[in-house]
Image (cartoon, helix red, strand yellow):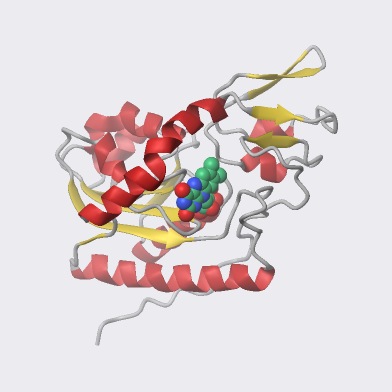
């Protein structure tokens, strides 16, 4: 089994790595320099994991799938997405990227994870205690998913008509325009000292330092990594309130894996 994931700020990485550990799957971020065509072709089951942005799959993940579409043919597919609270059909939308490719969807699940939009007043960042509660709940759901998958149970979260309707009309229908705007809506404040961290960490290579100033390439995928990691708190994307606290991701070592069994 092969797991491929994209994670802007660590939540999806946590789920992907934990799942792969339990299921003894190889696990790669799509940002890694790996021959994915060869890896996908060689695997019988592919698990994908990504964060939800407005009930959509992030652009960077869409581009990845578009590049490797044909390699997915004939594979069993497990779809995991992470979200703060709601995506409707966030896992199902992934299947639209593979329209016309024969894949066997074995499992689809949504995991509620901590907020990473650190400068939006409506969604405060999780306290350390709340973070632990998120991890505990996600771990429980993941261990149930692994048990089900091993037992051949097929589950498709978000595939029913109501979830599709809510995903589309509450979020996706509006997100398309927002995503296009956001790709060009990265702002750097005067606090920027051109340390170059954003240049190194951006998965889209959206930043470049040229002639002692920051140049933006207008290809942001909205992952919020730069917003959360800029040492000067000088970067904002789409939401331009001042950044005071940043989401640090899930840094703690996962607890020992307990594979629950049906009795
Ligand atoms: C631009 C953006 C849009 C988001 N949209 C949603 C959403 O529609 N529903 C939701 O529940 N969470 C939403 N989130 C929260 C993330 O999906 C969630 O925190 C995710 O676990 C982050 O994963 P990562 O750490 O792997 O990047 C959004 C986050 C960002 C940055």
Instruction: Report whether 83 appears left or right of 127.
Output: left
Relative vertical location of residue 64 with respect to residue 168 in this rendering, above or below: above
Closer to the camera in the image, 75 or 141: 141
Quadrant housing residue 249: bottom right
In percent of width and height, residue 75 lies at 20, 45
Relative vertical location of residue 117 with respect to residue 178 in this rendering, above or below: below
Residue extending farthest to the top is 211
In percent of width and height, residue 162 lies at 25, 55
Closer to the camera in the image, 248 or 150: 248
In percent of width and height, residue 255 lies at 54, 73
In percent of width and height, residue 62 lies at 38, 33
Closer to the camera in the image, 86 or 131: 86
Q: Residue at x 33, y 51 (%)?
A: 166
Instruction: Report whether 4 appears left or right of 44.
Output: right
Q: Residue at x 22, y 30 (%)?
A: 70
Quadrant housing residue 211: top right
Quadrant housing residue 115: bottom right
Closer to the camera in the image, 58 or 243: 243
Instruction: Report whether 133 appears left or right of 151.
Output: right
Q: Quadrant of the C terminus?
A: bottom left
Q: Residue at x 39, y 29 (%)?
A: 63
Relative vertical location of residue 142 with respect to residue 13 in this rendering, above or below: below
């Amino acid at each position: 089994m092969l797991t491929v994931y994209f994670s802007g700020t660590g939540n999806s990485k946590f789920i992907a790595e934990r799942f792969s550990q339990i299921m003894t799957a190889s696990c790669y971020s799509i940002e890694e320099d790996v021959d994915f065509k060869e890896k996908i072709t060689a695997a019988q089951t592919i698990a994908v994991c990504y964060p939800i942005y407005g009930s959509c799959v992030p652009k960077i993940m869409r581009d990845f799938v578009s590049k490797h579409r044909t390699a997915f043919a004939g594979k069993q597919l497990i779809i995991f997405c992470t979200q703060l609270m709601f995506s409707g059909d966030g896992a199902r939308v992934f299947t639209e990227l593979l329209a016309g490719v024969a894949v066997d969807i074995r499992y689809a699940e949504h995991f509620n994870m901590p907020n990473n939009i650190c400068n939006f007043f409506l969604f405060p960042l999780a306290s350390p205690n709340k973070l632990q509660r998120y991890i505990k709940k996600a771990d429980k759901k993941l261990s149930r998913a692994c048990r089900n998958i091993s037992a051949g149970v097929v589950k498709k979260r978000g595939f029913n008509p109501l979830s599709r309707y809510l995903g589309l009309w509450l979020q996706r229908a509006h997100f398309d325009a927002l995503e296009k705007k956001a790709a060009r809506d990265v702002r750097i404040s005067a606090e920027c000292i051109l340390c170059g961290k954003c240049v190194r960490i951006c998965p889209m290579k959206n930043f470049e330092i040229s002639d002692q100033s920051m140049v933006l390439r207008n290809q942001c995928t909205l992952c919020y990594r730069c917003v959360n990691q800029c040492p000067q708190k000088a970067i904002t994307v789409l939401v331009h309130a001042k950044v005071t606290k940043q989401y640090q991701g899930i840094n703690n070592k996962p607890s020992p894996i307990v594979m629950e069994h049906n009795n």
